[in-house]
Image: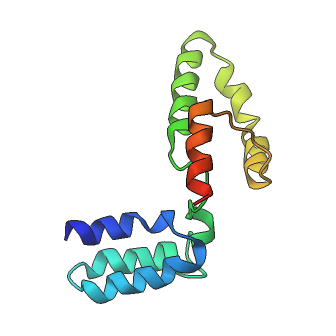
């Protein structure tokens, strides 16, 4: 069961075109978790579902965690304690940030050691 759950959790690390096939293999191996599988199918895998694989596949993405979001929330909470108008000003930028993420214009900085690790991963 643990290995089966691990396979489901690894789906975002696969290339978009392999996700559905690997999911089908998981379904064939385990029918006991029908409710979970149905949820995943309806929400994450259907073409008209809420999230399609192209939106959540992390294949060959250098940032595969939510650490950036966690850091931003920490900064926002600390800054909001000092500045009552901060949240008001930040709220005006939400649509701008969404557009930047969608268009791939948001820049991320990584430490050199992690850039080197990513280079090794993506050249294999």
> Eyeballing the image, is 75 above or below 102?
above
* Residue found at x 58% / y 18%: 80
> Eyeballing the image, is 53 above or below 58?
below
**The N terminus is located in which quarter?**
bottom left
Front residue of 119/92: it is: 119
Taking the image as drawn, is residue 52 in sight?
no
Q: Is residue 21 left or right of residue 99?
A: left
Q: Position of residue 33 (x, y in %)?
A: 24, 78
* Colouring of the image: rainbow
Q: Position of residue 56 (x, y in %)?
A: 56, 63
**The C terminus is located in which quarter?**
bottom right
Q: Position of residue 68 (x, y in %)?
A: 56, 37
Q: Count how many numbered circles sit on residues in the image.
A: 0
* Residue found at x 24% / y 83%: 30
> Eyeballing the image, is 86 above or below 120?
above
* Residue found at x 34% / y 81%: 26
* Residue found at x 42% / y 74%: 40
Front residue of 120/95: it is: 120
Taking the image as drawn, is residue 122 in sight?
yes
Front residue of 21/68: it is: 21
Residue placed furthest toward the top:
82
Q: Is residue 47 left or right of residue 20?
A: right
Front residue of 39/55: it is: 55
Q: Quadrant of residue 60?
A: bottom right
């Amino acid at each position: 069961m643990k290995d089966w759950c691990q396979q489901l959790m690894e789906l975002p690390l696969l290339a978009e075109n392999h996700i559905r096939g690997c999911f089908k293999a998981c379904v064939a191996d385990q029918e006991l978790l029908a409710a979970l599988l149905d949820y995943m199918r309806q929400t994450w895998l259907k073409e008209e579902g809420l999230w399609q694989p192209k939106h959540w596949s992390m294949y060959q993405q250098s940032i595969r965690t939510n650490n950036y979001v966690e850091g931003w929330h920490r900064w926002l909470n600390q800054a909001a304690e000092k500045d009552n108008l901060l949240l008001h000003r930040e709220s005006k930028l939400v649509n701008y940030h969404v557009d930047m993420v969608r268009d791939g214009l948001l820049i991320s900085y990584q430490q050199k050691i992690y850039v080197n690790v990513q280079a090794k991963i993506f050249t294999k």
